[in-house]
């Protein structure tokens, strides 16, 4: 099993390192010299309309600081307003050109020719014509030189995405000009060649149109060009502000709701494998602007012919915070050259400023559209999901078949494959399959023996929390802890020390009392749907391994509210104990008896978790069908949605119904989570998915750790599918868990710091939402390599330094350098000393 795990990890890391992911246009690092001066741009890539003398002042001499021969490119004719002389530079691949540097002719120090002004034109294959560049005010002219030796640089705003560029000297009066050139910019890795979209709203008082679009504009529709959605400049929160003097609505493109979805079609240079799309959107709901309510993305190899299976995404409306935000839609490695995106209106307007993709190029000949049967049914639109009707193996097989068919169509003269070796090949393959099958059987047999031995030893690895016992460490968890006196909080430092020890017998201050929830109240839900249990729940008379007796319960005592989702064992329901102060709980059912042993181990492990801040087990049935377990649930739902419904007390809440959470309340909730994780740590149990979505909020801000909401479809976008493994919460995982599959209480500490960051940012965005999954793996790899290039989550707004220092300690590369949950709980308890939440 160890060899197999290493082998699969190697495949995953190998795939990860070989892929090249495109990202959005980031102008910060995009000012590198493209190679005119250095010679990286070769002479063969340079041409001109004319040259006075190709040997001495031809286009290949038009390199910045070139002192050879005539030392410049000089056109044959004198330049005026109406002349059309140009120097052409072929960049071959698509580049982003952000600036131009110019000089006059060197001429052995005797030159006097230079260009006072010039214009530029550029080319992309989809444009099918040369386009004259204009700045954001419509000006075409760029200032040149006033002498022959000074280098003058002009930044291009907007920048130019092109594969060819022309420099056209200009003069108000007839004169001889010569030029030396350098270009600055970077490769355009996004691969996007154009987007087609309706033109934005344009009014005298507010212009929300795309004013720098370089394609065709006809009948209110933009086609075959690029513009403000790809210029690398994001709009401000208030789109009516006059930004940089460019007028109202600048950098936003806005569309009005006409009862149909907004449709944008993107064309790329090559067939690509897409992992995500990022949309920078406006949410000024008091001015009738909101983020789209849901989206659909279709993929195709040709325009107007798309695969019928779409990626669906829904967005939870935010009527509290009006700031602009980045919305990421996971595209789940869909393949295509064209992407059709449909955005559904949530209010009167949709405003977008930037759109970018994470993608990699796909090699192969694609001449036929990859088809799938029409699904003929509607899909639920919760969260982020890919609708599929094929098995996991079929899409890849169909793709390979299509590529082979395409290759045959492109190469009709390709010789037919010989059939002389079919027999021996089949024999060899059969032998290999038999060997692999034998190996798998041996591995499974050994694994079953180890599991059986683990059960006998009381070690339960497969639990509902995905709990996993840590290796025994007598130094960290002494069997007979030393009794310590009650700590003096005044002497506790404001930073977490890994040598800080908290004894389990400390007389800690109890949490505030928790009054029962009001009758007929369920978080954020004014009404309930009463469902019938799938089967009648019979008596429960079995005992668990820890000696806890199980009470009897019947179906009449359970009122079903909704189906939460489905786990590896069966369906999960939210329900209510009608005769127990309307207490809420979750019902986990076993649908397949073949999973009974794992289900039983999970129930036994859950029975050991008896803590105020852990969702404990209430009832269970293991003796007869139906098999199930009841666990605690809280009336206010999960912490992620609870935070999104509130704002900080320092915020000027615009919405009249905005609820406030003080900083003390946030730390109070985090302290409870640390306390619950300390309890799990004492049992050497690992959670593996610690996040706000898996914490429950009860009355008086009581927090309980669970894992139920990972099964809700609304949180599907928080999980990443890697190399056929189960979906992973990659953005919350430590580097050793993501790359090596190693889980421990210290990897949970890493996740706790991300959870703490979520709490202090009110869960308004995903961790590292500016990184795609591949880039996120790259960042975790920097931790593994310990090369100092790793990125950390930014410090939340108004977050004290000592709290952020705690997060950084939890994100230490070495597990031994991270604090334990004992230390974290003591530290947060010190910061929250004496706090009592208001009634809730």
Image (cartoon, rainbow, N blue to C red):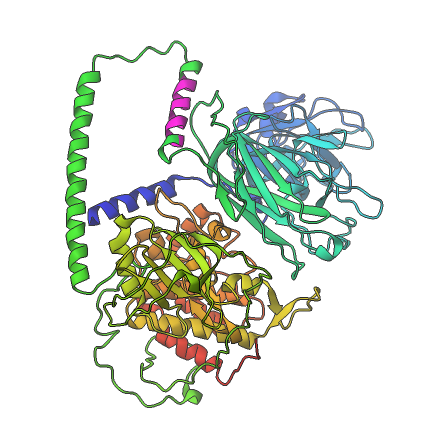
> Picture coordinates of residue 542 (x, y %)?
25, 65
Q: Residue furthest right?
A: 204
Give the residue displayed 66% in from the left and 46% down from the top: 353
Quarter in which the C terminus is drawn: bottom right
Give the residue displayed 43% in from the left and 71% down from the top: 673
Any part of residue 60 in sight: yes
Q: Magenta span has 402?
A: yes
Q: Does residue 631 appear to the left or right of 164 in the view shown?
A: left
For the residue pair 547 and 333, the one nearer the viewer reads as 547
- Find residue 152 and report its image quarter: top right
For the residue pair 563 and 298, the one nearer the viewer reads as 563
> Picture coordinates of residue 562 (x, y %)?
49, 55
- Which residues lie in the magenta part? 395-407
Above or below for 586 versus 117: below
Above or below for 242 versus 129: below
For the residue pair 106 and 65, the one nearer the viewer reads as 65
Q: Does residue 722 appear to the left or right of 115 in the view shown?
A: left
For the residue pair 535 and 222, the one nearer the viewer reads as 535
């Amino acid at each position: 099993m160890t060899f197999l795990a290493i082998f699969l990890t190697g495949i995953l890391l190998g795939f990860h390192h070989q892929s090249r992911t495109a990202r959005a246009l980031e102008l910060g690092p995009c000012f590198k010299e493209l190679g005119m001066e250095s010679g990286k741009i070769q002479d063969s890539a340079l041409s001109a309309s004319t040259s006075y003398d190709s040997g001495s002042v031809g286009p290949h001499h038009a390199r910045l600081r070139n002192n050879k021969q005539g030392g410049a490119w000089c056109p044959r004719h004198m330049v005026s307003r109406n002349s059309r002389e140009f120097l052409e530079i072929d960049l071959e691949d698509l580049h982003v050109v952000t600036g131009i540097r110019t000089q006059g002719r060197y001429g052995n120090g005797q030159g006097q020719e230079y260009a006072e002004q010039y214009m530029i034109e550029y080319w992309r294959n989809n444009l099918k014509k040369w386009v004259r560049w204009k700045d954001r005010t419509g000006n075409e002219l760029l200032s040149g030189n006033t002498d022959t030796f000074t280098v003058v640089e002009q930044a291009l705003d907007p920048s130019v995405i092109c594969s060819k560029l022309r420099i056209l000297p200009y003069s108000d009066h007839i004169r001889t000009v010569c030029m030396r050139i350098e270009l600055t910019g970077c490769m355009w890795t996004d691969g996007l060649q154009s987007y087609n979209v309706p033109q934005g709203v344009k009014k005298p008082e507010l212009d929300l149109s795309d004013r720098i679009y370089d394609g065709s504009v006809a009948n209110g529709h933009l086609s075959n060009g690029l513009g403000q959605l790809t210029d690398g400049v994001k709009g401000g929160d208030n789109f009516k502000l006059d930004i940089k003097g460019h007028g109202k609505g600048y950098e936003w493109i806005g569309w009005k709701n006409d009862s149909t979805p907004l449709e944008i079609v993107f064309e790329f240079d090559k067939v690509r494998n897409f992992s995500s799309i990022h949309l920078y959107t406006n949410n000024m709901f008091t001015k009738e602007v909101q983020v789209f309510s849901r989206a659909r993305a279709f993929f195709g190899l040709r325009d107007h012919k798309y695969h019928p299976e779409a990626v669906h995404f829904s967005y939870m409306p935010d009527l509290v915070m009006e700031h602009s935000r980045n919305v990421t839609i996971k595209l789940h490695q869909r393949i295509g050259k064209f992407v059709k995106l449909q955005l559904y209106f949530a209010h009167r307007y949709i405003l977008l400023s930037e759109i970018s993709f994470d993608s990699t190029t796909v090699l192969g000949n694609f001449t036929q559209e990859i088809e799938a049967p029409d699904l003929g049914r509607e899909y639920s639109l919760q969260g982020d999901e890919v609708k599929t009707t094929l098995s996991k193996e079929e899409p890849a097989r169909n793709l390979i078949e299509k590529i082979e068919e395409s290759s045959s169509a492109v190469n009709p003269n390709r010789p037919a494959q010989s059939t002389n070796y079919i027999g021996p090949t089949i024999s060899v393959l059969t032998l290999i399959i038999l060997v692999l099958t034998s190996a798998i059987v041996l591995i499974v047999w050994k694994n079953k023996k180890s599991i059986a031995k683990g059960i006998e030893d009381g070690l339960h690895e497969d639990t509902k929390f995905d709990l996993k016992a840590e290796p025994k460490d007598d130094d960290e968890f002494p069997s007979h802890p030393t009794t310590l006196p009650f700590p003096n909080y005044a002497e506790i430092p404001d930073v977490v020390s890994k040598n800080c020890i908290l004894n389990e017998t400390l007389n800690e201050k109890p949490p505030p009392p928790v009054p029962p929830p009001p009758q007929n109240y369920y978080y954020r839900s004014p009404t309930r749907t009463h469902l019938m249990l799938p089967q009648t729940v019979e008596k429960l008379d079995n005992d668990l391994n820890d000696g806890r007796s199980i009470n009897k319960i019947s179906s009449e005592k359970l009122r079903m509210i909704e189906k939460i989702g489905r786990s590896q064992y069966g369906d999960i329901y939210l329900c209510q104990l009608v005769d127990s102060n309307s207490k809420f709980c979750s019902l986990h059912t076993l649908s397949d008896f073949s999973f009974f042993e794992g289900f039983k181990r999970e129930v036994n492990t859950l029975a050991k978790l008896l803590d105020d801040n852990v969702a404990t087990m209430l009832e269970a049935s293991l003796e007869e069908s139906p098999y199930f377990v009841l666990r605690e649930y809280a009336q206010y739902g999960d912490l992620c949605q609870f935070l999104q419904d509130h704002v900080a007390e320092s915020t000027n809440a615009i919405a009249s119904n905005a609820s406030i959470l003080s900083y003390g309340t946030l730390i109070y909730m985090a302290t409870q989570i640390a306390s619950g994780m300390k309890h799990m740590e004492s049992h050497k149990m690992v959670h593996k998915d610690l996040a706000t979505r898996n914490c429950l909020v009860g009355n008086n801000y009581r927090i309980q750790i669970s894992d139920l909401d990972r099964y809700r479809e609304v949180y599907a976008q928080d999980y990443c599918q890697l190399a056929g493994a189960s979906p992973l919460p990659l953005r919350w995982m430590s580097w050793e868990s993501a790359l090596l599959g190693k889980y421990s209480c210290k990897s949970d500490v890493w996740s706790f710091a991300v959870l703490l960051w979520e709490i202090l940012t009110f869960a308004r965005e995903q961790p590292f939402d500016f990184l795609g999954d591949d880039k996120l793996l790259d960042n975790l790899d920097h931790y593994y390599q310990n090369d100092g290039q790793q990125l950390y989550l930014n410090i939340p707004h108004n977050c004290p330094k000592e709290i952020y220092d705690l997060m950084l300690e939890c994100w230490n590369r070495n597990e031994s350098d991270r604090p334990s949950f004992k230390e974290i709980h003591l530290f947060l308890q010190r910061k929250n000393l004496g706090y009592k939440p208001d009634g809730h």
